[in-house]
Amino acid sequence: MHDKLIRALTADVPLPEELHERLVTRATADRALDVAYRVVDSPLGPLLLATTEQGLVRVAYAAEDHDAVLEDLGTRISSRILRSGARLEGVARQLDEYFARARTTFGVSLDLRLIRGFRREVLDHLRDIPFGRTESYAEVAAAAGSPRAVRAVGSACATNPMPIVIPCHRVVRADGSLGGYLGGPAAKEWLLTLEAAA
């Protein structure tokens, strides 16, 4: 019964918001909800946010195709996914504060289950790069314990499941040029300019 309801709701069947949130609350109480998501507006376009009981698990740019991201979460975590504004209100508020230059760090719980091996070492280090600072791919590789793994650092950044919150935009080439970015070079430049101006 709950699985059918959840499949219907993930198909974005229109429901009054209050009723939808009551269904989310009920599904959570009945342990029938494993992933809650919402899409928020940002200066970089719509961002999909997804959370589990453990914490934020995904931030996705529109270029990643939000439907594909939800399908991937359904495969890798659980098909019990519902849209929920309330469950992600705190994350959305912190992102708004960050974009307004009123926040330099994020204080949200993270669910890191989508990150393994060396990529986890890299992304753990990225969280230590201070707001407004950058490091080269080589510096990150050395800090993660594998100085020769510069390309692997690039791969870890390119597959970061929580861009912005885990700040892979702070990793640049040794010559200071931007390098690649999941949200595109314009988004990376915008984020670095935002932090430099704060």
Image (cartoon, rainbow, N blue to C red):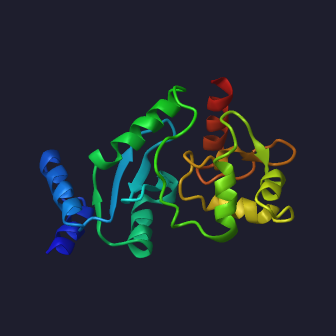
Q: Quadrant of residue 83?
A: bottom left
Q: Is residue 120 above or below residue 91?
A: below
The answer to whether residue 192 is left or right of residue 7 is right
The answer to whether residue 8 is left or right of residue 133 is left
Residue 108 at x, y = what percent?
A: 46, 45
Nearer-the-camera pick, 185 or 111: 111
The quadrant of the rendering that contains the C terminus is top right
Can residue 139 be seen from the camera position used here? Answer: yes
Nearer-the-camera pick, 112 or 83: 112
Q: Is residue 145 above or below residue 193?
A: below
The answer to whether residue 156 is left or right of residue 40 is right
Identify the residue at horizontal 31%, vertical 49% (top origin): 87
Residue 197 at x, y = what percent?
A: 66, 24
Residue 38 at x, y = what percent?
A: 34, 50
Count the labels in the image: 0
Residue 121 at x, y = what percent?
A: 68, 61
Identify the residue at horizontal 19%, vertical 66% (top origin): 30
The quadrant of the rendering that contains the N terminus is bottom left
Can residue 85 be seen from the camera position used here? Answer: no
Identify the residue at horizontal 51%, vertical 32% (top origin): 99
Identify the residue at horizontal 24%, vertical 67% (top origin): 31
